[in-house]
């Protein structure tokens, strides 16, 4: 959780007791819990609004997908799910031959 180990949590709890005191600590914890719940609700509403505004083609959008690391990991490093035909790989005999020296390549003036 946030890269905090059990020892760090104990230190944070001890500092919180010293700073806020044992009397005010439960009230502070309730307030922090309420604040966290409100922030989670706002994030959830923002995600739903974003999905609704983008339309049905982005219904499965996750905000984690917008992180560049996750994007690269998802699209470049994972295996491809595309079904490829089992066509044989072209060998060098199927490739066009080089033009003889001095011969100009074909040119189509309408294509340029």
Image (cartoon, helix red, strand yellow):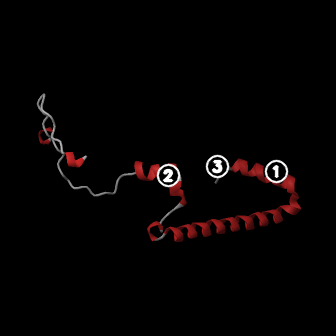
Q: CA distance from mark 3 to mark 1?
A: 18 Å
Q: CA distance from mark 2 to mark 3?
A: 19 Å
Report x, y in % for residue 31: 78, 66
The residue at 74%/68% (across/down) is 34
29 or 42: which is nearer to us?
A: 42
Q: Nearer the viewer, mark 2 or mark 3?
A: 2
Quadrant showing the N terminus: bottom right
Q: Earlier in the sequence, mark 2 or mark 1?
A: 1
Q: Element at badge 1? A: helix
40 or 100: which is nearer to us?
A: 100
Report x, y in % for residue 77: 41, 48
View extreme (front): residue: 109
Q: CA distance from mark 2 to mark 1?
A: 36 Å
Report x, y in % for residue 67: 53, 52
Number of callouts in the render? Answer: 3
The residue that disc 3 covers is 3
57 or 111: which is nearer to us?
A: 111
Q: Is residue 106 left or right of residue 43?
A: left
Q: Is residue 34 above or below residue 112?
A: below
Q: Element at badge 3? A: loop
Q: Earlier in the sequence, mark 3 or mark 1?
A: 3
The answer to whether the residue labelled 2 contacts the one labelled 1, judged by CB atoms less than 8 Å apart, is: no
Q: Earlier in the sequence, mark 2 or mark 3?
A: 3
The residue that disc 1 covers is 15
Mark 2 nearby-residue class (10 Å; few <14, some 14–19, many ≥20)? some
């Amino acid at each position: 959780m946030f890269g905090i180990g059990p020892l760090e949590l104990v230190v944070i709890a001890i500092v919180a007791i010293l700073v806020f005191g044992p009397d005010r600590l439960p009230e502070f914890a309730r307030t922090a819990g309420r604040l966290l719940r409100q922030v989670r609700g706002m994030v959830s509403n923002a995600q739903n609004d974003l999905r609704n505004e983008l339309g049905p083609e982005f219904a499965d959008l996750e905000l984690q997908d917008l992180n560049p690391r996750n994007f690269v990991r998802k699209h470049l490093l994972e295996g491809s799910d595309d079904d490829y035909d089992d066509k044989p790989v072209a060998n060098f005999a199927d490739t066009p031959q080089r033009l003889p020296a001095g011969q100009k390549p074909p040119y189509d003036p309408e294509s340029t």
